[in-house]
Image (cartoon, grey):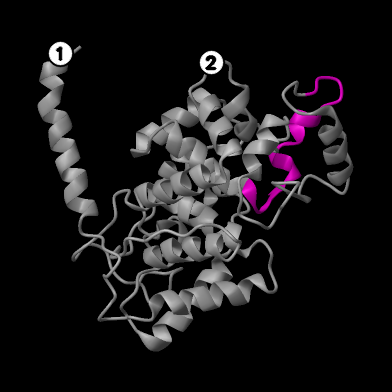
């Protein structure tokens, strides 16, 4: 094992490389080439929410699943085509939706600024407005990403967090992509304060002969009733304020009402450093809002393509 002193130059080198990449992203990137891009994206997301309560959650999920596989490069949006095996075949991307919303945003942006705004940046901006239009706090989105010309199915299979994993596995996956395995993990999990989940992602916790002891029994009974139509039935991730971006996700965990096993382990894992963070966010909406904003920036800065790398896709589902 190398000594601590021997590791210092490597650590400094890695930090320098990360900083040199993310510093190329800037909130003013489109100020001259597409100055109205934010208002265009906001308008389309707002329109989508009028007919789809899940629109915001779909956009954040797409952004999350994009960034966890080779960085925030729009690869999750690619469908099977010559030279591309889509990441959508990975189990972690099962049932992922929202492509119609991304397509609508892309069309609206292309009508005003053709060939300028990347699909990866559309996911980042769409996630911002998913939160603010659900009464959440906004943040300044660094922009300037370009779109990948490749996809990584194996990466999607291996790197995406699973709703069935324990805390140790979740923490490793966050560390592996360069995110903090405590604050970033807990804050980004807080996105489950809105949206829905299919019953098949948590119904194993409802086994009456061997129920999950970390799940409130009354809530478990309610979930069994809700899931009776079938395993693909949708249930609110937050039973209290399902379409509002707030900190109730964390108070739900305190009451053993985390819907997914991967939610509840943040609090139920004895002695884990995530426990105090969950409690802090439950007690302070402002602390959660600030931490979530910073963690979204941290995630959005994961290995972006910039400069002449990649391309600006005219269709987010296909290479140019």
Identified at 39% across, 87% down, the residue is 112
Can I make out residue 106 in this image?
no
Q: Which residue is mark 2?
A: 271
Secondary element under disc 2, as helix, strand or loop, is: loop
Screen quadrant of the C terminus: bottom left
Nearer to the camera, 177 or 143: 143
The label number, if any, that marks residue 93 in the structure image: none
Nearer to the camera, 174 or 73: 174
* Percent position of residue 168, x then y: 49, 23
Work out whether 235 lies above or below 208: below
- Label 1: few (<14), some (14–19) or many (≥20) C-alpha neighbours in 10 Å: few
Secondary element under disc 1, as helix, strand or loop, is: loop
Nearer to the camera, 47 or 158: 47
* Percent position of residue 16, x then y: 15, 42
Screen quadrant of the N terminus: top left
Identified at 45% across, 78% down, the residue is 39
- Left or right of 29? Residue 274 is right
* Percent position of residue 147, x then y: 33, 64
- Left or right of 182? Residue 20 is left
Q: Are marks 2 and 1 in contact (CB under 8 Å)?
A: no
Instruction: Check residue 97 for magenta coloring.
Output: no
Residue 181 figure quarter: top left
Give the mark nearer the N terminus: 2 vs 1. 1
Work out whether 270 lies above or below 116: above
Q: CA distance from mark 2 to mark 1?
A: 29 Å
Q: Which residue is mark 1?
A: 3
Please provide the residue range marked out in magenta.
193-211
* Percent position of residue 5, x then y: 11, 17
Work out whether 87 lies above or below 306: above
Instruction: Check residue 195 for magenta coloring.
Output: yes
């Amino acid at each position: 094992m190398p000594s601590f002193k021997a590791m210092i130059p490597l650590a400094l080198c890695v930090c320098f490389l990360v900083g040199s990449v993310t510093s190329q992203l800037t909130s003013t990137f489109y100020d001259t080439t597409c100055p109205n891009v934010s208002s265009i994206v906001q308008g389309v997301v707002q329109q989508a929410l009028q007919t789809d309560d899940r629109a915001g959650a779909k956009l954040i999920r797409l952004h999350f699943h994009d960034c966890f596989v080779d960085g925030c490069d729009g690869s999750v949006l690619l469908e099977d085509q010559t030279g591309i095996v889509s990441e959508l075949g990975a189990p972690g991307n099962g049932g992922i939706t929202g492509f119609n919303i991304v397509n609508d945003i892309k069309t609206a942006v292309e009508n005003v600024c053709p060939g300028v705004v990347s699909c990866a940046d559309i996911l980042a901006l769409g996630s911002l407005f998913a939160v603010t239009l659900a009464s959440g706090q906004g943040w300044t989105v660094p922009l300037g990403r370009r779109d990948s010309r490749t996809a990584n199915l194996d990466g999607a299979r291996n790197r995406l967090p699973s709703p069935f994993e324990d805390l140790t596995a979740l923490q490793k996956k966050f560390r592996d992509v360069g995110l903090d395995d405590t604050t970033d993990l807990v804050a980004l999990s807080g996105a489950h304060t809105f949206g829905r989940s299919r019953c098949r992602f948590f119904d194993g916790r409802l086994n009456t002969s061997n129920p999950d002891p970390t799940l409130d029994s009354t809530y478990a009974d309610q979930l069994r009733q809700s899931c009776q139509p079938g395993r693909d039935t949708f249930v609110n991730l937050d039973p209290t304020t399902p379409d509002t971006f707030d900190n109730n996700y964390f108070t739900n965990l305190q009451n053993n009402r985390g819907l997914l096993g991967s939610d509840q382990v943040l609090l139920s894992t004895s002695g884990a450093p995530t426990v105090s963070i969950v409690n802090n966010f439950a007690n302070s909406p402002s602390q959660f809002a600030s931490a979530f904003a910073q963690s979204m920036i941290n995630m959005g800065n994961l290995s972006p393509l910039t400069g002449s790398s990649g391309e600006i896709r005219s269709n987010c589902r296909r290479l140019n």
